Image (spheres, rainbow, N blue to C red):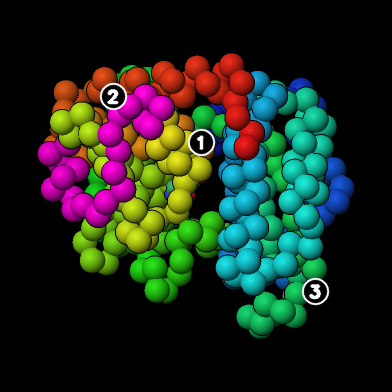
Amino acid sequence: MTQAAASEKQATSGDHGGELLIWLNGKLVPKSEASINVYDHGLLYGDGCFEGIRLYNGRIFKCASHIDRLFKSAERIRLDIKKTPAEVDALMRETIEANGLTDGYIRLVVTRGVGTLGLHPFRCPEPGIFCIADKIQLYPTEMYDEGMPVVVAKRPRIPVACLDPRIKSLNYLNNILAKVEAIDAGVLEAIMLNTDGYVGECTGDNIFVVKDGAISTPPPEAGILEGVTRQFVMDLCAELGVPLKERLFRIDEVFEADELFLTGTAAEIIAVCKVDDSTIGQGSEGPITRKLRERFRDIVSANAPED
Ligand code: PMP
């Protein structure tokens, strides 16, 4: 294994002693045996949907919201999961238990299933379902205090009329190519604009700007995934009395922000210290971001809400 591969493995995978067990189409199978049929349309066409979910202290954070979004994504691509939300909930818990996890990250995936070589989605009689419960650390720990640098991607987000971004689909190439722009620039995340030039979101995170004590985040019409963490942070703002508005804004407001932060299941809440060559605010985590991150940490470590 190369050094880069070893450090990637360490960053994304916990030490489970034995081999990780994956829930795959009704069975728990060792990771090395958990493979997908090459005729699965999830693989051939990115035809499917997924969720990334956190487990904190034995509780599945916002479990119901994730299951609800998975079913909505599936409905929007006319994919019949052929399970009830309660059955999906149960298979996730079975996977967590089989791996003895109390804290970690769950990847729940539904593919169109095995079909023919043509695109025809309805020639795939059974959906494929798998669930991975593992560890994750998306960004280095020190970036949470110091903030992370990002860039503005040149590539816009796919317009809503072409692909509804509320669908958390298996087709992430638009985001991956923007992520490549970030990596080429030496950073880990990129801000994506929509084709009208408004700020949308990042490649795997939602975005919030803070100006004069008030927060703004792009509305769904900007062409974003409606993040579960985004909604939780909006609820936190209401609880803490921090004014927050969903509204369209352009990139100049990002450069002029007092604070800027991103949210996502894997990222949680992380400050941005720099966009392209411009320092944001003080160049480290600002007071409002810190307050939200501390409140978030207190809630999830004490008793993470599952609804
Ligand atoms: N936007 C995109 C494109 C994402 O992939 C994600 C999830 N990684 C998010 C936003 C954040 O959503 P959530 O808080 O539900 O993880």
Residue at numbered disc 2? 288
Label 2 amino acid?
A: Ile
How far from the left and from the top, in percent, is residue 95?
78, 37
Quadrant (top left, top right, bottom left, bottom right) of the C terminus = top right
Q: Residues within 10 Å of mark 1 (few under 14, many from 20)?
A: many
How far from the left and from the top, in percent, is residue 19?
78, 32
**Quadrant of residue 289 in the image?**
top left
Q: Which mark is residue 125?
A: 3
Q: Earlier in the sequence, mark 2 or mark 1?
A: 1
Residue at numbered disc 1? 266
**Quadrant of residue 72 in the image?**
bottom right
Image-based side of 228 in relation to 83, left or right: left
Determine whether label 2 and label 3 are within 8 Å by CB.
Answer: no
Whether 118 is drawn above or below 47: the answer is below
Q: Residues within 10 Å of mark 3 (few under 14, many from 20)?
A: few
* Ligand 1 within 8 Å of the CB at mark 1: yes
Identify which residue is drawn at 65% across, 58% down.
Answer: 71
| Part of the protein shown in magenta | 237-257
Confirm whether residue 267 shows in the render: no
